[in-house]
Amino acid sequence: MDDDTIQRANRAKRGSPFLNTEQAAAYLKLSARTLKRLKRAGKGPVFRRHSRFIQYHIDDLDSWSSENAGRDFVV
């Protein structure tokens, strides 16, 4: 196993790496409303639908944030 796999496994043991919309918005320091608008516009982070629930993986939030550093969004 590489270090990244071990770190991800340890994170999963402590709790789920998936966040709901409100938690993901707080993690990104956005309002839930803004995150929902970005999702509808196709400009937000990758999300997954688990049954009827929208979930965001922490790694996807970090990637999206890094990729969009310094950009202004018009939603």
Image (spheres, rainbow, N blue to C red):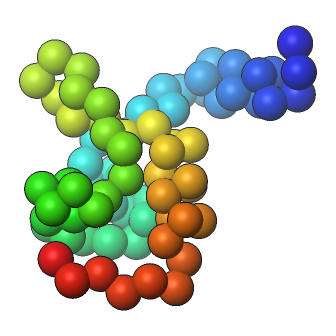
**In screen coordinates, is 4 left or right of 69?**
right
11 or 41: which is nearer to us?
41
**In screen coordinates, is 12 left or right of 36?**
right
Mark count:
0
Quarter holding residue 33: bottom left
Q: Tell me where residue 5 appears, x and y as whole percent.
A: 77, 22
Q: In this view, does 33 lie above or below 20?
A: below
26 or 62: which is nearer to us?
62
* Residue 15 can be seen, yes or no: yes
Quadrant showing the C terminus: bottom left
Q: Tell me where residue 25 appears, x and y as whole percent.
A: 32, 60
Q: Which residue is drawn at 16% across and 17% down?
A: 51
Q: Tell me where residue 36 appears, x and y as whole percent.
A: 16, 58
Quadrant showing the N terminus: top right
11 or 64: which is nearer to us?
64
Residue furthest toward the right?
A: 2
* Residue 36 can be seen, yes or no: no
Q: Which residue is drawn at 80% across and 30% down?
A: 4
Q: Is residue 57 above or below residue 49?
A: below
Q: Residue at x 69, y 27 (%)?
A: 8
Q: Tell me where residue 23 appears, x and y as whole percent.
A: 34, 51
Quarter holding residue 46: top left
Q: Which residue is drawn at 32% across and 39% down?
A: 47
**In screen coordinates, is 42 left or right of 10?**
left
Quarter holding residue 43: bottom left
Residue furthest toward the top?
A: 1
